[in-house]
Amino acid sequence: MRIAFLVLFLPVALLPLSAASPSAKKAEERPEVPPPPFTDGIFPCSGCHATMEVNPKRRALTEFHDDIVLRHDEEHRWCLDCHDAKDRDSLHSASGELIPFSESYRLCGQCHGEKFRDWKAGVHGRRSGDWNGHKTYLLCAHCHNPHQPRFRPLAPKPPPRPPQRPGSTKGGSR
Amino acid sequence: MNQGPEQADGLSRRQVMAGAAGAAAAMILTSCGPKSLHEVPKDRLLSLVAEMEKTYKEKLGADIKVGTEPALPGVEFAYALDISRCVGCRRCVYACVEENNQSRDPQIHWIKVLSMEKEKGVDFAHAGAYYDPKEVPEDGHFYVPVACQQCRNAPCTKVCPTGATWTERDGIVVIDYDWCIGCRYCMAACPYGARHFNWTTPGLPTAEINKNTHYIGNRPRPSGVVEKCTFCIQRTRNGRYPACVEVCPAGARKFGNLLDPGSEIRYIIEHKRVLVLKEDLNTLPKFFYFYAT
Amino acid sequence: MSFIHLFSRFTWGSVRLVTRGNRLYWTWIVFLLALIVWGLFAFAEQVRGGLVVTAMRDQVSWAFYIGNFTFLVGVAAAAVILVIPAYVYDWKPIRHIVVYGELLAVSAIVMCLLFVLVDIGRPDRFWHLLPPVGYLNFPDSILAWDVLVLNIYFLVNFLVVTHILYRAFTGRAYEKRLVIPLVLFSIPMAVGIHTVTAFLYNGLAARPYWNASILAPQFLASAFCSGPAILLFLLQLLRHFTRFEIPDEAIWKIAELMAYAMFLNLFLHGAEAFKEYYSGTEHLLYTRYWYQGLGEHRTLVPFAWTAVILNLVSFALFIVPAARRNPVTLNLGCLATYAGVYIEKGMGLIIPGLTPDSLGEIYQYYPTMIELRVAAGIFATGFLLFTLMLKVAVPISLGEFRLNGAPVPLSDPH
C-alpha cells in the first residue's frame, strides 16, 4: 500500500519541479550511475548458480558466501528476499518485478522511501558533475554495503595545526 | 612559490629598497587608474589579468590561468550541509586547500570542521577543531564544518574601509587581493571565523599550484592580505560543483542555485529542517545546515 | 616684513631652540632616539617577515597595536577636558595651559596613526584609503569614519596651536574669529574621535564583548582620566624646569575632574560586569576570560586586577581633597590612573574581545618582543615630537622667543 502510494506520489511530486527547470527534467530520466561495486570476479552470479539447484530454505550459508554477515534487518530477511532465485543476475522487488543490479536503488527505495526521494533529488548521497547540468549519481551500494548498510567509520585527515607564537617549536596554546 | 618564511628572511636591503621604489611607482602608476578590481571595465580587467599571469610566471614559474568569468544571470549560489551525515573526516578541508591554493606552511584552512557534543547541540563554546581519533564519527559527537557563510547581510563587506571585499551578483563574497590593505577589520566583524590572514608570504610549492584560477578566487595570494572561501568561484561559474561537494564521502555537502526551484538547495529548504549559524545576528547566510533525517 | 621672511625666521628660531638644551634635555632626546631606532629595527623585521613575527593569529587578529591605538585616541580626546573650561567658561588658570593640551593631542594622534600603520598587513597600500586615487568606504565602514575624524581632529588642533604660537611669536593676539570657532568645533570633534573609535568595536555583532552600548561612554570616561594624567605630569615638569607659572588651583581642578571621570569609568565598568555576570549568558565568556580566566587560560587575569586596583587607588587619591593637593599622592594618583587605563585599554579591551574567537577557540595572546619594541618606538616618536614642540611653544608663551622688536605677547601668564 505504502509502496503503491509512493510510486503514484513521486511523479506528481516531481511535476512542478520538472516544469520549472532543466535540472529537474534530468531527474525524471534514469539517473546516470557508475557500474555497481561488485567484488572482483563475482558477477555474473549465474556463472556459478546456473548449474546449481535452488534451495529456498532460509539458512546460514556455510559452503560459500560465508564471508557475508547480514546486518540489515537480519531477523526478517535473507538472501532471496532481494536476490532473485530464478534470474540469478537480477534482484527483485517485493512484488517480484526483476530489477537489474545497475538499478538497485529501486529495490532499496521500497523500504527507504524518504531516502530514495532525497537521493533522486540529489540530496541524499554524493553527486558530482555540474550543478546546473550533467550530474553523476552513485548507487546506494557504492556507499552502503547492502548486507551491512551502516556507513563505515573512516580515519580522519590530520587536524589543523594550532596557532603558534613565533619561535615556539612545539604546539602553541589552543 | 617555493619561498616559505625562511626565504623571506633572506630578503636583502636591495630587495627592500626595490620594494619601496615599487610601491612609489605603484602610486604614480595610479594616474592611469588604481588597480581596484571592483566593477572594473572588462577591457581593463583583461589587461590586469594578463599582467597577473605574467607576474605569476616570473615569480612562481607557473603558467597560471587567471579566469575572469562573470556572474551568471539568474543565479544566486547557496550551499547546504547535512549535519546528520557529516562524519568529520576533513576530506573537504584538504580538497579545498589543494583546489584553492591555500598556504601549506603556515597552514591556512578555509574550512574548519568543529566537533560538537550531541548533548550540547550546536554550541561553539563546547566545540573543538583539533579532534584526532583513529576513526570518525566519534560516539556522542557530531560535526559542523564552517567556512564562509556568504551572508546576504555581510558584516565583513560593510566594514572594509577600502571597498576591497564585496558581494558579487551571484551572491559570492569576494576579496580583491591587490586592493586589500590588511587591516583585518573584516576578520573582527566576521561571526564565523571564515576570514584568514596571510601573516607571511604563503608557502605554496610550485608543483602543488592549481593553475586553473579566478581573479577574485583562488589565484595565489600575496603576504599581508585576507582570504576566504569563494564557493570555488573558478569551478562554480563554469557550472561545476565546488571541490568540497565532490570530495565529501558522506554526500553531506549540497550546492546549487537558489533561484532555480528544481535545485537541490530549494528541495532542501522546502523539505528539510534547516538552520543557519548564529541566526540572531541577522547575517542571512546562504550557507544552510540541515538534518536530512 | 613678508610672510615668507617671518616664517623663515620662525623656523630657524625654532630649530635653534630645539638644538640647544642642557644635559638633561639631551639625555632625554638621546634616550628617545635610541628607543626609536630600536623600534625601527623591530619594525623592519616585521616588514620583512610579515606580521607573523607578532603573536597575532587568525584567532586573535587584533591585539596590542590596536589596543595602544585605542588608548591614544583617548589621550588625544582628553585635550577637550582643558579646552571646555578654558574657552567656554573663560577660566583663566586653565586657559594658559590649553595650548599644551592641544600639543599633546597632536602628538597622540600622530602615535595613533603610526599604530594603525604598523598593524596593517600592507602599509605600502595605505594610499588605497585616500580618494581620489584610492577609495574610502564612507559612510559604511566605521574605520573610514575614524580615518576622517582623526585627521580632521589632527588638523584642527594643529591649526589652532600653530596659529596661537605663531601670533604670539610675532607679538600679536590670535585671531579670535578663527580660533574660537575652531576650538568650539574641536570639542564635539574630541568627543567624536573617541565615540567613533568606540563604535569601531561596538558595531560588531560578532564580538559580544564589544557589542554593548556602554562602550562609547566608558571610552570617554576613561579618556578623561588618562589624558589629564599625562598633562598633570607635564604641567609639574614645566613648572619645575621653566619659569612658566602654573597655579596650584589649575592642577587641583584637573585632578578633581579626573576623580569624577574615574568614578564614571568605574561605575560603567561595574554596570557592564553586573549585566554579564548576573544574566550569565554565553556572552559572559569574554568577561570571564579577562577577570577570571577560562580553565587554565589565565594569561590576562593579573592584568585585569592590576587595572582595577590602580583605578580604585587613583579614584581614592583624587576624590580626597587633601590627597590631590599633596604633590606625592597627586603624582601617585596620576601614575595609577595612567597605568590603570593603559592596561584596561591596551590589554583589556581588544584581547578579551577576541578570546575565545568567534568559533569558541581560545588562543592565549600576549605580545612578542617585536610588538613591544615597535610600540616603544612609536611612543618615543610621539614623546619626541611633543618634547620638540614644547621646546618651541614654552619660550613663545613666556615671551622669550619672539620676533625682534615684537611686543610682549598677550598670552604671557598674569
Image (cartoon, helix red, strand yellow):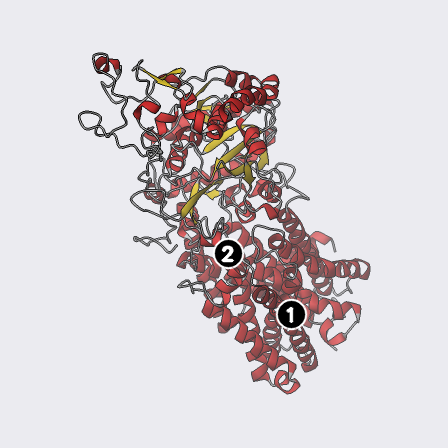
Residue that appears at 54% across and 22% down: A10
Any part of residue A17 in sight: yes
Kind of element beneath mark 1: helix
Label located before the other in sequence (1 or 2): 2
Looking at the image, can residue C407 be seen?
no
- Residue under mark 1: which chain is it in? C
Q: Where is residue B107 in the image (x, y as percent from the top left)?
A: 38, 42
Q: Are marks 1 and 2 on the same chain?
A: yes
Q: Tell which of C118 and C177 is nearer to you.
A: C118
Q: Nearer the viewer, residue A97 or B219?
A: A97
Q: In this view, does B159 lie to the left or right of C357?
A: right
Name the front one of labels 1 and 2: 2
Disc number placed over residue C65 in the picture, else none: 2
Q: Position of residue C197 (x, y in %)?
A: 63, 55
* Residue identified by numbered label 1: C395
Disc number for residue A144: none
